[in-house]
Amino acid sequence: MSRILGVVNLKGGVGKTTTCVNLGAALALFGFKVLLVDLDPQKSLTGWAGVDQWPTVSNALTGEVDPLQALVRWRKAKCWIMPAGMDLRLAETQLMATSQREYILKQKLQRLTDFDFIIIDSSPSYGLLTINAICASDEIIIPLQTEILALESTIPFFEALGEIKKRYHPDLKIAGILPNMYDSRTNLSKAILDQMRASEHLGPLMFKTFIRKNVKLAETPSLGYAVTRYTSSYGYEDYCALAQEILNDSDRAKMEAKKRNSNSKNSTATQLGLAELSDDIDDIDDDLVQDVEDEEALSLTETDN
Ligand code: ATP
Ligand code: MG
């Protein structure tokens, strides 16, 4: 069974896509098999991965293709993605006429049992796609900018979320509110974070982890990498901390089992004189997935933050 996490906030630019990719890549580093689903017509996640191909999540949603056919491997992030296409808004309109229209993504993702985590990137607008993202999720992550009035800005969102939960998904859980763009150089960010934590309603929902402002997080989308490539960056540290915080007991047990399995595979390989086994995520039938190119950007150097 996959654990399905939606990354949701009706406010734009708070770090939904950044969180989807970098949390996914951090979980993949821990050895989990991760699928990222782009359910935002802006296609930021798809653009980041450099995917421009058919079929997409739209075709999976409308039933034109099996969801397995819409998977693409994104090696630079060690994840798979189900990309969005130009026609996602159109697909949303088509879905309006479908019965059980709020649960279509949920039904489609049920086919993909091979992943440990499925993370859904959603759009900042309140429509059927966002409702599908929430209804398909076991839990949601709510990124929030560490800025003045950030808490006030969540009021309409929490009202909408309460309504969706009541009408369509009473079991929905909030994994946590994730403070993002924390500026460690200013006292203001600290004061805002303290205010968020002290809030009666939202304080108990906050993750311990917060994501610092980090130039690597802003740069990586244009390079096609996740921040996990830059192990000396704040972004790497923060998203690995978030991934750790998200793991539950059963995830940890799974992680240990994977580690043992991979150690024994590697020792078999060593005994046979083979090169070290790839740490790539390779268990899905190769014929079913396409590949995003993985050319090394030779001009890249690893720098601090
Ligand atoms: P939208 O609602 O439009 O989909 P979003 O919520 O997905 O936006 P992102 O695209 O993830 O937000 O982030 C908005 C911008 O802020 C991006 O340019 C991203 O690179 C940058 N960004 C996000 N988090 C950080 C951070 N911690 N440090 C520096 N830049 C960041
Ligand atoms: Mg986005």
Image: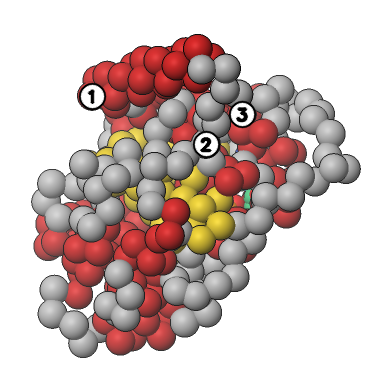
Callout 1 amino acid: Ser
Callout 2 amino acid: Asp
Q: In screen coordinates, is 130 left or right of 266?
A: left
Q: Residue 44, can we see it?
A: no
Picture disc at residue 280 = 2
- 3D distance between C-alphas at marks 1 and 3: 24 Å
Neighbours of disc 3 within 10 Å: few (<14), some (14-19), many (20+): many
Q: Residue 89, can we see it?
A: yes
Picture disc at residue 62 = none
> Along the polypeptide, which appears first: circle 2 or circle 3?
3
Question: Is disc 3 placed on a helix, strand or loop?
Answer: helix
Callout 3 amino acid: Tyr
Asked if labels 3 and 2 touch by Cβ distance under 8 angstroms, the answer is no
Residue 224, compared with residue 64, is above or below; it is above
- The image shows residue 212 at horizontal and vertical percentages of 62, 31
Asked if labels 3 and 1 touch by Cβ distance under 8 angstroms, the answer is no
Neighbours of disc 1 within 10 Å: few (<14), some (14-19), many (20+): few
Question: Is disc 2 placed on a helix, strand or loop?
Answer: loop
Picture disc at residue 236 = 3
Q: Nearer the viewer, mark 1 or mark 3?
A: 1
Q: Pick whichever, 101 or 50, lies toward us.
A: 50
Q: Pick whichever, 68 or 182, lies toward us.
A: 68
